[in-house]
Amino acid sequence: MAGNSFGTLFRLSTFGESHGEAIGGILEGCPPGIELDLEAIQLEMDRRKPGQSAIVTQRKESDQVRFLSGIFEGKTTGTPIGFMIANSNQKSGDYDHIKDSYRPSHADYVYDQKYGFRDYRGGGRSSARETACRVVGGAIAKQFLKELKINAFVSQVGSITLNKEYQELDLGKTDSNPVRCPDPMVAAAMEEHIREVRKEGDTIGGVITCVIRNVPVGLGEPVFDKLHAQLGKAMLSINAVKGFEYGSGFEGVRMKGSEHNDAFNPDGTTKTNHSGGVQGGISNGMDIYFRVAFKPVATLIQAYETIDKEGNTVQAKGKGRHDPCVVPRAVPIVEAMAALVLADFVLLNRSLKA
């Protein structure tokens, strides 16, 4: 299986399945001498882990990271950083009913067709549990990029939308509620909606907005390695993501060019930021901001019709512990993938100047 690595110079490779012994990864390219706050890394893991509130999956995993290499006396050595996260709360029997059938909108069917074999326990390699490894790599990237501020938050659940610009929000309140929406009143409405959907055995989607501040001018390469293109690839690689837009996004089509152009100030900053901090594929020093759309979780705790391996129509029903809405736990994943992209481009800039 290809496609298990992300990045060029700051490169993360992950391994493991949802119901295997463990998941883990190897992070290459991290410069030596970076003093790592291991508690901060674990805090990022705690933001993503299952069972943290009543509106997420109740699988209980401590997600304690065990570092195997690349760190000595609290600092990075410049060698590959190996790490492992044990799986300790699998209930593989919850998936026996799909051993010979395919869940709609899951990777079950395509895995079977592509590889001729699949690990049906929780989706195996296609499970979102793999994203825990990304959070570890992203947490290290954040500490390498200590001058940058990367903040993601839930801005929509179903039809409930946070109708405020990020500049109006106190992003320090993002983790003050289970939904991870920085507006308490909107967060309460979102949480209630998720609870209602969960009672129905159904799921709901949402949107995460991410803001990156203090980005230097010059990150990104023109043509195929544009900064926004790599951010888009990073976000679209996350399980359940269906859309990515940066800056004015699709709403920009409603504007005329005279309205959309970002006029310059004498110091090179711009009066507006419809470009989302990226021009010509290269960061311009303004805030980078983008939105990521997540579909409703495909596993429903209700009866549904599907097909088995022989193409026969069968009746099935979801079992086990699943998120009714993935966006609250996906906030640290979005931040992690953004950090990995930026760390890669920072190192690339260093190599060009060397």
Image: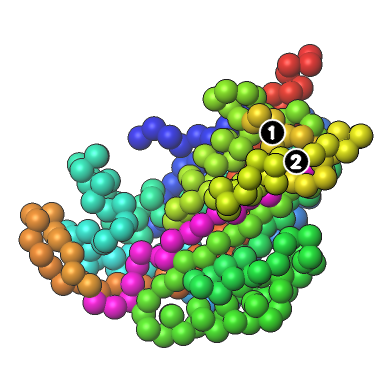
Tell me if residue 268 comes above or below residue 89 in the rendering. Answer: above
Instruction: Tell me the magenta residue range.
Output: 286-303
Q: Residue at x 59, y 82 (%)?
A: 189
Residue type at the position of mark 2? Asp
Q: Quadrant of residue 234?
A: top right
The quadrant the N terminus occupies is top left
Residues at discs 2 and 1 in contact (Cβ within 8 Å): yes
Instruction: Tell me if I can see residue 208 in this picture.
Output: yes
Left of 253 or right of it: where is 148?
Answer: right
Q: How many badges with numbers are in the image?
A: 2
Where residue 155 appears, as percent x and y from the top left, is 62, 65
Instruction: Tell me if I can see residue 65 in this picture.
Output: no
Element carrying mark 1: strand
Left of 104 or right of it: where is 136?
Answer: right
Q: Residue at x 33, y 72 (%)?
A: 300
Q: Residues within 10 Å of mark 2 (few under 14, many from 20)?
A: some
Q: Residues within 10 Å of mark 1 (few under 14, many from 20)?
A: some
Residue type at the position of mark 1? Gln
Tell me if residue 226 comes above or below residue 286 in the rendering. Answer: above
Element carrying mark 2: loop
Circle on res. 227:
none
Q: Residue at x 48, y 45 (%)?
A: 237
Residue furthest to the top: 354
Of tags 2 and 1, the one toward the viewer is 2
Where residue 285 appears, as percent x and y from the top left, is 80, 37
Q: Quadrant of residue 116?
A: top left
Q: Residue at x 63, y 57 (%)?
A: 209
Q: Dot 1 corresponds to which residue?
A: 279
Q: CA distance from mark 2 to mark 1?
A: 10 Å
Where residue 165 appears, as percent x and y from the top left, is 72, 62
Circle on res. 262:
2
